[in-house]
């Protein structure tokens, strides 16, 4: 059995008081959240300690559907210890539920990685596996190795699902490629999210894929044809269909604020999921990295391929995405919480455990100051970042 990600200070039982608490029903000023035994409780025991968080926000732990690594470690190619380091890095930035994303590689290698990552899912460190490639369009490959791309043959898609031993949560596909629609149907039948991304599909082809069962847009606007007035392409189809949740990378590099505003306005807050698409440099720093087989330079926090200069994932962490959404995009905090916690938790089928601050759920929470800077992270009742320190 692999090692585990460990946290720091047990908060049990504790009543968190005084903060502006964001609940599914709205924000409560001076709210109370009771933590006992790693879960949120409905009633406080007589001996419960009290932690005053007046002047702060208390929001659910963040849920990231699309993440390739962090802390200098890769989910695609690193050892178990590397993967745990990446999980720990993002947890320290508020992501208490994380799906590990693999980039395009040889099929046998991806199957091997699925086996390794599935162990970490089974023991609770990861929430699942996401395969971003190899079933994507060479026209929109982004930071994926073109010689390793292939059409989405349902038999090969099934190979990856089987290798993940029930832990595959999402597969990104260019559904216009041969086998794309059949692969979408296969994924839907097996309870795995079919995500449309790295695609050169038309509007009509995208509508067909949604009808077959695709329910997520992988980093909307990026690695797909732009929105056109005569050829609206996939963006219009993905935004207009109520069955689709759209991923947005809110780092200021992948999206102009007007594009983010358009997505929220057209899709609505209940159909947006903030993701990081983070690579190794997230929470680590500038330098030379590898994303799969490709070399990446990170300069001033922006990751680009050495060969060609395409954006190569991000160095984003979810606390930064939250703060940017609140201070730059001026989104309502309740909408940000939907996008960064509740909506992705629902997509994962985990909303009964995470994604909101309700009794019976895991005690996963983030403490933010009045300026939305991270001050504390609670994971299953343990302080990863203790707001009383520093």
Image (tube, rainbow, N blue to C red):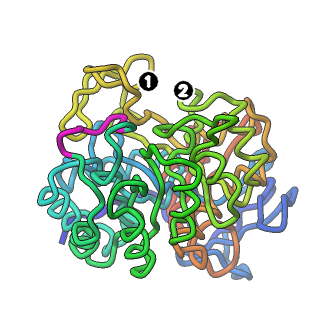
Name the outermost residue toward the right. 29
In the rendering, at what x and y percent does residue 116 appear? 19, 64
Label 2 crowd (10 A; few <14 / some 14-19 / many >=20)? some
**Quarter holding the N terminus?**
bottom left
Q: In the rendered view, tell whether residue 111 sits above or below residue 286.
A: below
In the rendering, at what x and y percent does residue 150 appear? 24, 52
Is residue 90 toward the left or the right of residue 106 in the image? Answer: right
Q: How many marks?
A: 2
Label 1 crowd (10 A; few <14 / some 14-19 / many >=20)? many
Residue 287 covered by magenta stretch? no
Is residue 268 toward the left or the right of residue 254 in the image? Answer: right
Residue for point 31% across, 51% down: 133
Please report the bounds of the magenta region as a residue range. 141-148
Residue carrying label 2: 253
Name the outermost residue toward the left. 108
Q: Earlier in the sequence, mark 2 or mark 1?
A: 2
Which quadrant of the structure image shows residue 162?
Answer: bottom left
Per the image, label 2 sits on a secondary structure element best described as loop
Residue for point 27% across, 55% down: 151
Distance between the alpha carbons at the discs numbered 2 and 1: 8 Å
Is residue 103 toward the left or the right of residue 107 in the image? Answer: right
Q: In the rendered view, tell whether residue 270 sits above or below residue 283.
A: below
Q: Are marks 2 and 1 in contact (CB under 8 Å)?
A: yes
The overriding secondary structure of the stretch rendered in magenta is loop
Per the image, label 1 sits on a secondary structure element best described as strand
Pick the front one: 349 or 352: 349
In the rendering, at what x and y percent does residue 280 appear? 32, 37
In the rendering, at what x and y percent does residue 75 appear? 28, 50
Residue for point 58% across, 42% down: 319
Is residue 304 toward the left or the right of residue 3 in the image? Answer: right
Residue carrying label 1: 302
**Quarter holding the C terminus?**
top right
């Amino acid at each position: 059995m692999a090692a585990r990600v460990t946290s720091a200070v047990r908060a049990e039982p504790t009543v968190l008081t005084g903060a502006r608490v964001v609940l599914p029903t709205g924000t409560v000023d001076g709210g109370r959240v009771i933590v006992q035994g790693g879960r949120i409780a409905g009633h406080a025991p007589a001996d419960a300690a009290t932690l005053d968080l007046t002047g702060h926000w208390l929001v659910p732990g963040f849920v990231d559907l699309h993440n390739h690594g962090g802390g200098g470690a890769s989910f695609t190619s690193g050892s178990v210890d590397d993967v745990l380091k990446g999980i720990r890095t993002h947890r320290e930035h508020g992501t208490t539920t994380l799906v590990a994303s693999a980039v395009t590689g040889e099929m046998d290698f991806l199957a091997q990685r699925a086996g390794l990552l599935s162990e970490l899912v089974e023991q609770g460190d990861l929430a699942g596996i996401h395969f971003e490639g190899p079933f994507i369009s060479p026209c929109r490959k982004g930071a994926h190795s073109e010689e390793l791309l292939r059409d989405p043959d349902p038999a090969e898609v099934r190979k990856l699902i089987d290798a993940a031993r029930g832990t595959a949560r999402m597969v990104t596909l260019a559904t216009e490629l041969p086998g794309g629609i059949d692969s979408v149907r296969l994924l839907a039948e097996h309870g795995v999210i079919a995500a449309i991304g790295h695609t050169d599909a038309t509007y009509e082809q995208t509508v067909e894929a949604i009808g077959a069962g695709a329910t997520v847009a992988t980093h909307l606007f990026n690695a797909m044809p732009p929105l056109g007035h005569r050829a609206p392409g996939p963006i219009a189809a993905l935004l207009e269909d109520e069955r689709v949740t759209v991923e947005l990378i809110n780092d200021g590099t992948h999206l102009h604020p007007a594009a983010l505003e358009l997505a929220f306005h057209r899709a609505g807050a209940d159909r947006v999921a903030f993701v990081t698409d983070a690579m190794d440099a997230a929470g680590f720093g500038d330098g030379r990295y590898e994303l799969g087989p490709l070399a990446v330079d990170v300069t001033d926090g922006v990751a680009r391929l050495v060969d060609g200069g395409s954006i190569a994932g991000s160095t984003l962490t979810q606390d930064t995405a939250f703060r940017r959404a609140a201070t730059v995009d001026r989104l309502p905090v309740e909408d940000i919480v939907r996008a960064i916690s509740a909506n992705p938790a629902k997509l994962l089928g985990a909303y009964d455990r995470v994604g909101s601050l309700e009794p019976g759920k895991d005690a996963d929470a983030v403490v933010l100051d009045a300026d939305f800077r991270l001050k504390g992270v609670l994971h299953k009742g343990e302080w990863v970042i203790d707001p009383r320190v520093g």
